[in-house]
Amino acid sequence: MVLRALSGLNQLVSCGGGVVITPQNRNILKKQALSVWLCASMETTLKRIRSGSRPLLEHASLQDAQELFEKRIPLYSEIADLLVSTEQPIDTVVGIIYDEINQTLYT
């Protein structure tokens, strides 16, 4: 799926948190993308995804969710070119990402 999504140029691909589990996905993302890790506190994350869009976290406790996240931190860190907290206004988040893309791709 990631390979197909990254088959063209100038694309934005939104990946689910589990994309980092597969070594092939991490390799593709690292080599073919500018990866932005959008992070938030576990409490904020759970509030945002309780709608049923994340089966692993649908009925997870805060502790279960934290354990899952902590297992994935090294994998996220392996591929992330930029880490941005989403615990700030969206225009700030967008500005940080925009500036990084301009610096990385156009300098």
Image: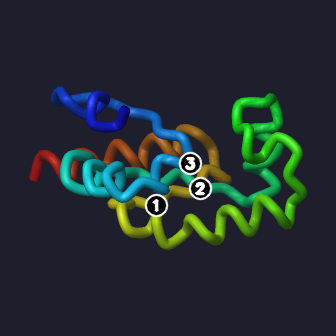
- Is label 3 or label 2 in front? 3
Position above or below: 10 against 75: above
Position above or below: 55 against 70: above
> Which quadrant of the structure image shows residue 51?
top right
Residue 16 placement, left or right of 105: right
- Please name the residue shown 88% across and 45% down the image: 59
Q: First in sequence: mark 3 or mark 1?
A: 3
- Please name the residue shown 73% across and 38% down the image: 55
Q: First in sequence: mark 2 or mark 1?
A: 2
The 10 Å Cα crowd at callout 3, few under 14, some 14 to 19, many 20 or more, is few
- Please name the residue shown 73% across and 49% down the image: 45
Mark 2 highlights which residue? 39
Give x and y (percent) for residue 6.
Answer: 25, 34
Do residues under tags 2 and 1 come within 8 Å of each other at their CB atoms? yes
Numbered mark located on residue 17 in the image? 3
Residue 106 placement, left or right of 14: left
The 10 Å Cα crowd at callout 2, few under 14, some 14 to 19, many 20 or more, is few
Give x and y (percent) for residue 39.
Answer: 59, 56
Residue type, mark 2 in image: Cys
**Mark pair 2, 1: CA separation:** 7 Å
**Mark pair 3, 1: CA separation:** 14 Å
Numbered mark located on residue 83 in the image? 1
Residue type, mark 1 in image: Leu
- Please name the residue shown 58% across and 39% down the image: 90
Residue 100 placement, left or right of 84: left
Give x and y (percent) for residue 103.
Answer: 21, 53
**Mark pair 3, 2: CA separation:** 10 Å
